[in-house]
Amino acid sequence: MIKIKKYFLNYFNLNNKILKEIDFDKVNKLLKEIEKLKNNKKKILIFGNGAGASIASHFANDINKNVKIRCLSFDSSVHLTCYANDYGYENWVKETIKSHYQKGDFIILISASGNSLNMVRASSYCKKKRYNYFSITGFKINNKLIRNSKNYLWINSSSYNQVEIAQLFLLLGIIDKLK
C-alpha cells in the first residue's frame, strides 16, 4: 500500500510541476480567442488523434453544453474513415477543415508530439489560408506543429500521458473559467 501511495503522490507532483511550467500568457490568449467566438456567433473546430481525439470530443461537448459556444470535434470512425479513405490519413484534418470552416471560425489542433503529419499538414493549410488556429503540443519545443503555428501552447514533457493530462486539464479549465 505504501509503494502505490508513493507512486501516485510522485505522479501527481510531476503533473503539478508540468502544469506550473506552462506559459499562462498563452493560455490567456487561447481563452480570449475562445471568448470572442461567443460574441461573434462563430464556432471551434477541434482535432486530435487517439487520446487527443477523446480530449477534443470531451472539450467540444462541454463547451457546447456549458458555455454555449458551438464546437465540433471530428472523432467518429465514420467521418475519419471516410476522409482518410478519400484523402489519405495525413490529409483528413486538412480536408475536414476545407469542408467545415467558415470565415471567423477558430481551429484547435491537439498533438502530444507535435509531429503528427495530419496535424502538421492542417496547420500548413491554415497558415496559408490565414485561418485563426491554435496548437497544443508537448515533447520538443521545436516540433513541426509549433514551427508552423504562431499561436501555441507547449507542455514540457515527453510522456504521452503527461502531455495529454495537461491538454485535458487546460482545455477543461478554460471551460470552467468561461462558465
Image (spheres, rainbow, N blue to C red):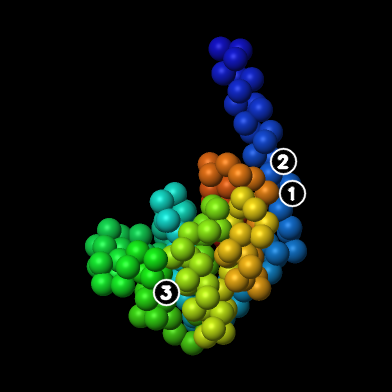
Number of residues whose C-alpha sits closer than 10 Å to that of mark 2, classed few (under 14), some (14–19) or many (20 or more): few
Q: Which of pointers 3 and 1 lies earlier in the amino acid sequence?
A: 1
User: Residue sitting at 64 percent across and 39 percent down?
Assistant: 15
**3D distance between C-alphas at marks 2 and 1:** 6 Å
Q: Position of residue 111 (x, y in %)?
A: 52, 57
Residue that badge 3 annotates: 94
Nearer to us of marks 3 and 1 is: 3
The reply to whether the C-beta atoms of the residues labelled 2 and 1 are less than 8 Å apart is yes
Q: Is residue 111 above or below residue 45?
A: above
Q: Which mark is residue 136?
A: none
**3D distance between C-alphas at marks 3 and 1:** 31 Å
User: Residue sitting at 52 percent across and 75 percent down?
Assistant: 124
Any part of residue 156 in sight? yes
Residue that badge 1 annotates: 21
User: Residue sitting at 61 percent across and 50 percent down?
Assistant: 139
The secondary element bearing badge 3 is classed as helix
